[in-house]
């Protein structure tokens, strides 16, 4: 992949989807956690962010907003932080 192709992928608007994983914590034990995946139109994964919340509805709401406003994957961590702070 050339440098131009890499930059093009970073600047493209991905499709966001919900993901689920099981985490293990010494104090909490095993627990379900939700995150998101930023995916290219061609299907390749740009970025995965795990363990945003244990509340599926919260992360699903975030995913819907990201897709509605076509947020670039370059800004995803800032958007997640702002979203969670607003709850």
Image: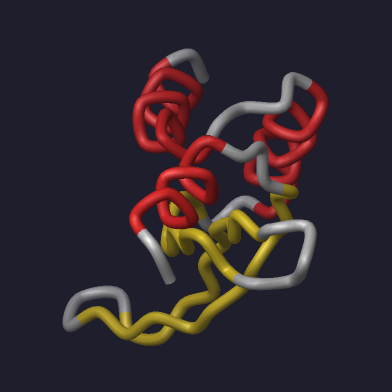
Q: Residue shown at 59%/60% (left/top)?
A: 37
Q: Position of residue 62 (x, y in %)?
A: 66, 34
Is 62 displayed left or right of 67 in the figure? left
Q: Is residue 34 above or below residue 65?
A: below
Q: Position of residue 5 (x, y in %)?
A: 49, 55
**Nearer to us in this view, 24 or 7:** 7
Q: Position of residue 35 (x, y in %)?
A: 54, 58
Q: Is residue 2 above or below residue 53?
A: below
Q: Position of residue 58 (x, y in %)?
A: 65, 39
**Image color mode:** secondary structure
Q: Quadrant of the N terminus?
A: bottom left
Q: Is residue 17 above or below residue 63?
A: below
**Nearer to us in this view, 49 or 41:** 41
Q: Residue shown at 70%/49% (left/top)?
A: 16
Q: Residue shown at 68%/31% (left/top)?
A: 66
Q: Give the image quarter of residue 50.
A: bottom left
**Nearer to us in this view, 30 or 71:** 71
Q: Is residue 65 above or below residue 58?
A: above
Q: Residue furthest top?
A: 86
Is 80 displayed left or right of 15 in the figure? left
Q: Tell how many labels.
A: 0
């Amino acid at each position: 992949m050339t440098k131009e192709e890499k930059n093009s992928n970073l600047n493209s608007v991905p499709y966001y989807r919900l993901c689920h994983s099981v985490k293990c914590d010494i104090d909490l034990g095993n627990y379900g956690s939700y995150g998101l995946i930023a995916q290219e139109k061609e299907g390749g994964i740009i970025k995965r962010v795990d363990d945003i919340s244990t509340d599926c509805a919260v992360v699903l709401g975030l995913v819907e907003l990201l897709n509605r406003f076509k947020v670039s994957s370059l800004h995803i961590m800032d958007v997640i932080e702002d979203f969670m702070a607003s709850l």
